[in-house]
Image (cartoon, rainbow, N blue to C red):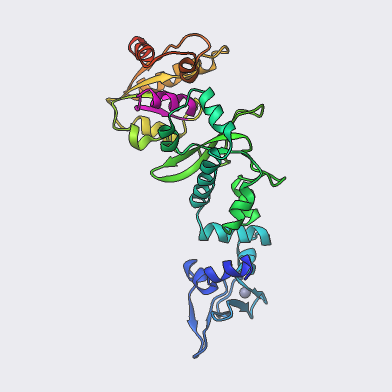
Amino acid sequence: MSDLERLKQRIPLLEYLQRHHWTGHRVGARPEFVGLCPLHEETHPSFYVNAYKNLFYCHGCGSGGDLIRFVELARHLSFRQSVAYLEEELVPTAQLLQHTAAFYQLELHRYPEGIQYLAQRGVRDPKLVEELDIGYARGGNLRPHLQALGYSLERLLQAGLIGPQGRDVFCHRVIFPCRQQDRLVNLYGRSIGSAFPHRLLPRSKGGLFAWESVRRFRNVILVEGLFDLAVLWQEGFRNTTCAIGTHLTPAQWAQLCEADDRCIYLAFDQDDNQAGQQAARTLAQRLIRAGLSARHVLLPAGHDPNSYFAAGATANDFARCLEEAPTL
Ligand SMILES: [Zn+2]
């Protein structure tokens, strides 16, 4: 059976229409239903659905066909877009991302360069790598893997996992899955080579990283990058969360502000152009206006928390930075 036949079998046309608020009544004893046509304006029902054949026909506007044809007409989509739309209805994107993340986790242990890169960035604890579900995209083999699981190429293109040339967009990247309450909402890929360092899929980055476990702390450390978070967790600072960048989405802002007795330690990059520090000051002022406390963690020039540890700093050194962080 072809993928298309399987898709149509898994979403029966009649069920699809009913789920989208079409009401039809049965015509005699046959598995045939008639109702008002969803594709054109009418007052007398002329839209027929044969539930056995999985086909529709409208005597008013003359359109007819299978489920994919219906979606093309009703949603003004191309054939391929309609297939992708139906697949999304059948299997939510969270599940597609889960399949992708699981594949990349296996890949991490198949090729040495991902683990080597993690070690070079100071992430060495295998338990932490597993806890964060870190993976590695070598590139080139995600597409056949996902297609074997039944995903169409169109779906993978639409999700942004595969580029127009058919290759993984995360090629040669270490992958951190981003979750929101147990649901995967995005993947972050850090280039291990010369490509642009940061990459997310073209969809929301979700809430603060690992917020479900961090929100119980009164003192919260906010960092820019997931490598900062990984080394801080490794060193025991489990009250660290990350916004992936210095810009907070409204959802991330709301999370930080949900308890007003919270103190936020801003440990952004101490980079040359001062962008991280400027962002930290602006965010601190906003937090204070919202009634929270904010402290500005000052690391040695040129460092972010990740590079600070990679350069030999200890948990005690960082704890001292926290103690000495000026109150804003
Ligand atoms: Zn019609």
The answer to if 239 sits in the magenta stretch is yes
Identity of the residue drawn at 55% across and 28% down: 116
Furthest-right residue in this view: 165
Identity of the residue drawn at 45% across and 17% down: 309
The magenta region covers: 222-243
Query: Residue 106, image x and y in percent?
Result: 52, 43
- Image quadrant, ligand 1: bottom right
Instruction: Please state which of residues 211 and 194 is positioned toward the viewer in this rendering.
Output: 194
Q: Is residue 231 left or right of residue 116?
A: left
The answer to if 219 sits in the magenta stretch is no
Which corner quadrant holds the N terminus? Answer: bottom right
Query: Residue 157, image x and y in percent?
Result: 64, 49
Instruction: Please state which of residues 296 and 225 is positioned toward the viewer in this rendering.
Output: 225
Q: Is residue 151 visible?
A: no
Which corner quadrant holds the C terminus? Answer: top left
Furthest-bottom residue in this view: 29
Q: How many marks?
A: 0
Q: Compared with residue 327, is residue 109 higher up or lower down, i.e. above or below?
A: below
Q: Is residue 272 left or right of residue 64?
A: left
Identity of the residue drawn at 34% across and 32% down: 214
Query: Residue 288, image x and y in percent?
Result: 35, 20
Q: Is residue 167 visible?
A: yes
